[in-house]
Every structure is written in structure tokens, then in C-alpha cells.
Image (spheres, helix red, strand yellow):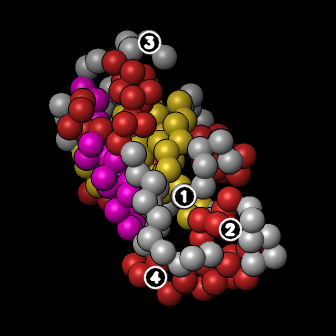
Amino acid sequence: MNHPLVTFTSRYGSTRRYAHALAETLDTRAVDLASMRDAASADPLIVLAPQYVTTILGRRRIIRAIRSAPGRTALVVVALSPADDPGRGALAQKLVAATGRAVTVFQLRGDLDPDRLRWWDRVLMAALRRELRRTPDEPVARLLLPRERVELVDESTLGPIVDWVQRRES
């Protein structure tokens, strides 16, 4: 492990929490992707980014950062949906393909605080809730229909990422 760098983009805070916890565990720093110039000294580079519906926040910056890293890179996607949700993996793989690099992908769960959503996220959530009323017994419906804060950030799930960083070869 030469010089790991943890970088992140976050809108509501879940990804930021994971980034700072990971950086502390790795005895390095967490840098907001918007303020990072390049990743030329990072080996490995770990990029944490939230997924909102059908997009990963900071896509262009993530691609530039990954392309500028000299060594191994990892993308950690944080979303409300379960880590094994096929839509999450497909979206991450599209982003990875755009980098033209080999990138290890990890999936983590994030929080949802309905009171902190921006207006367009509220509109999307309202539409999603209308659809979910048709299937109120589905796990995602039970999670989102009550309109309460959902806390799924679990820093203990960072273990596989720490293990990956500590391995010298990918």
C-alpha cells in the first residue's frame, strides 16, 4: 500500500460518513471529489459516490479521477437499495466502462431523510410512493411508504474495502 486516497461526492451525508470512516481506518484523509485536482499520487484510489435513482453523483469527476490514478482503483456506490440490487451493479458497470480502466466495485447502503430531500428528489419519491402503494407488502414499499428517516449506514460493512486496499495486488 503506497499512498491510499479516499475521495467522495455526497449530497445528503451518507457517502461522506463512509468516506471519513474509511479514511480514518486506513490512516489517510478523505477528500471531496470537487476539490481534488488529480489522483496522480494515489495508490490505490478509492472513490465513494451515491446513487440517486438512475445516476451516480459526480459521474464526470469520477471518470477523470479514475483515469488519472496510476495504480489500483475502486468505486464504492452508496444507495438506499440493497447491495445486490441488479440495477445498482449495471449502473456502476456503465460508469466503470466509461473509464477504460479495471476498477473494483463495492456496494454499500445509505440513509434516507425525507425532510432533507431537494424538491426534485421529493417529486421522484412521491412518484415512487404512488407506484409502491400497489405492492405495499414488498420490502421496498415497507421501507419507503411510512415517510420516515431510514438509517442503513453501517460502517462495519467497510471491511471488504479495507481488505482490498491492504492487498498489494488486485
Residue 146's disc is none
- Mark 1 or mark 2: whose residue is earlier in sequence: 1
Q: Are there few (<14), some (14-19), or many (20+) residues within 10 Å of tag 3? A: few
Q: As shown in the figure, which amino acid type bears the numbered disc 4?
A: Arg
> How many numbered marks are there?
4
- Mark 1 or mark 3: whose residue is earlier in sequence: 1
Q: Which residue is mark 1?
A: 80
Circle 4 or circle 1, nearest the eye:
1
Disc 2 element? helix
- Mark 4 or mark 1: whose residue is earlier in sequence: 1
Toward the right, the furthest residue is 134
Disc 1 element? loop
Q: Which residue is mark 4?
A: 118
Residue 141's disc is 2
Q: As shown in the figure, which amino acid type bears the numbered disc 3?
A: Glu
Percent position of residue 37, x then y: 28, 50
- Measured Cα–Cα span from mark 4 to mark 1: 16 Å
Please determine whether, in this image, residue 69 is positioned above or below residue 118.
Answer: above
- Mark 4 or mark 2: whose residue is earlier in sequence: 4
Q: As shown in the figure, which amino acid type bears the numbered disc 2?
A: Ala
Q: Are there few (<14), some (14-19), or many (20+) residues within 10 Å of tag 2? A: some
The answer to whether residue 32 is seen in the rendering is yes
* Residue located 39% across and 14% down the image: 167
Q: Is residue 107 magenta?
A: no
